[in-house]
Each structure stands twice: as structure tokens, then as C-alpha cells.
Amino acid sequence: MAPSPLAGSDIYERILTAPGGLVVLEDTDTGSLIEQFRSIARHNGQSVYLWEPERGMGNLREAHASIPGSQRLGNALRYIQQSIHFGIYLIARFPSPLTAMDGALLRQLARAPAGHVRRIVLLDTVPAMIASFDDVAVRISGVAPVAQRPRLRDGRWFL
């Protein structure tokens, strides 16, 4: 029995309750997850942003709203750092050669004060590159664990 993918709302809740500000999302279909997050953002009015290298950072709730000058990852990370509002920031197609400045900004954002509900979610990441953030990143799987079926043995149920 193969593990089934989690619904976007389940992943959204797990991101919000993550203990750190930097979340690495593994084992997900990025395209469908972004569409599910777009629907969640429109339904509940929360701020969910998506950064892509070609387009920069844009608000998922309002498709036409983008942040000018955010095509470079460093500029987008500085925007996130200066924002005082709630937000989930999805970073898709994480750039391969990460500069030292971008890495330092990611570490600062990961260690943000507990009062800020601001999460940076890395999608489609290369495991070797993210290994340097293992001390500050929270890894979340996009698939549900395989549930064990209870079995009856000698009149008692076992998992």
C-alpha cells in the first residue's frame, strides 16, 4: 500500500504549526500544491506568496499582484525580512548556486522571533544544498505515513 499525498489544507496547517521559520517540504507535487494553496489563500484571506526565478514574488490570493524588483532571491528575502505581517512564502525552484548573503538571510529568517508567524517554505530543493540548513530547517513530508491496520490475535488487537 503506497502512502497517499496529504491535502493542501493538511500541509498548510503543518507549516503553520512548524517550530521554525524555515520549512523544507519534501515529496510533494509542487504544481498541484500551489493551486491548493491559492484556493486556501482566496478562501481564508491569508497572505501566501510564491517566488519563482522568472516572475519574482507574487501574492497567490491576487494573481495580478506582484512585488516589483523581486526576481532576485536576495531581494525577495530582504522583502520577507522587512515585512511585519503574517505570511507564508513559498520558494519554488530554489536557485542552485546559493550566495553567501542569501544563505545568511535564510538563516536569519529561520531564527525569527516566535511572535512572528512568517514561514519560508522551500519547494523542489536539492537535498545536498539544503543539508547546510539542517540545524535551522524543519522538514515536512507531503505524504501521509502508511497507516498500520489493527490485527486481532488471540482475542486482542495489535498494531
Image: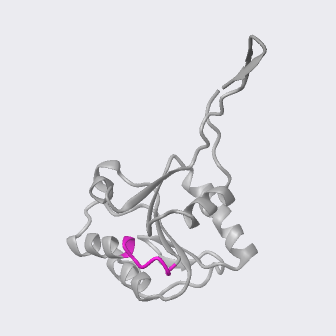
- 45 and 22: which is toward the camera: 22
Residue 52 lies, with reference to residue 81, above or below; the image says above
Q: Position of residue 95 (x, y in %)?
A: 34, 63
Question: Which residue sits at x=53%, y=84%?
Answer: 66
Colour scheme of the rendered structure: one colour
Q: Where, quadrant-wise, is the N terminus in this rendering?
A: top right
Residue that protrudes farthest toward the right in the picture = 155
* Residue 114 part of the magenta segment: yes
The magenta segment is: 109-116
Residue that protrudes farthest toward the left in the picture = 100
Question: Which residue sits at x=40%, y=80%?
Answer: 76
* Residue 153 part of the magenta segment: no
Residue 121 lies, with reference to residue 102, above or below; the image says above
Residue 69 lies, with reference to residue 51, above or below; the image says below
Question: Which residue sits at x=30%, y=52%?
Answer: 131
Q: Is residue 5 left or right of residue 85?
A: right
Q: Position of residue 148 (x, y in %)?
A: 66, 29
Q: Position of residue 50 (x, y in %)?
A: 52, 72
Question: Which residue sits at x=65%, y=81%?
Answer: 62
Q: Main secondary structure of the magenta part?
A: loop
Q: Is residue 153 left or right of residue 68?
A: right
- 80 and 138: which is toward the camera: 138
Callout count: 0
Q: Quadrant of residue 129?
A: bottom left
Residue 122 lies, with reference to residue 111, above or below; the image says above
Q: Where, quadrant-wise, is the C terminus in this rendering?
A: top right
Q: Position of residue 135 (x, y in %)?
A: 31, 58
Q: Is residue 140 left or right of residue 32?
A: left
Residue that protrudes farthest toward the front in the picture = 155
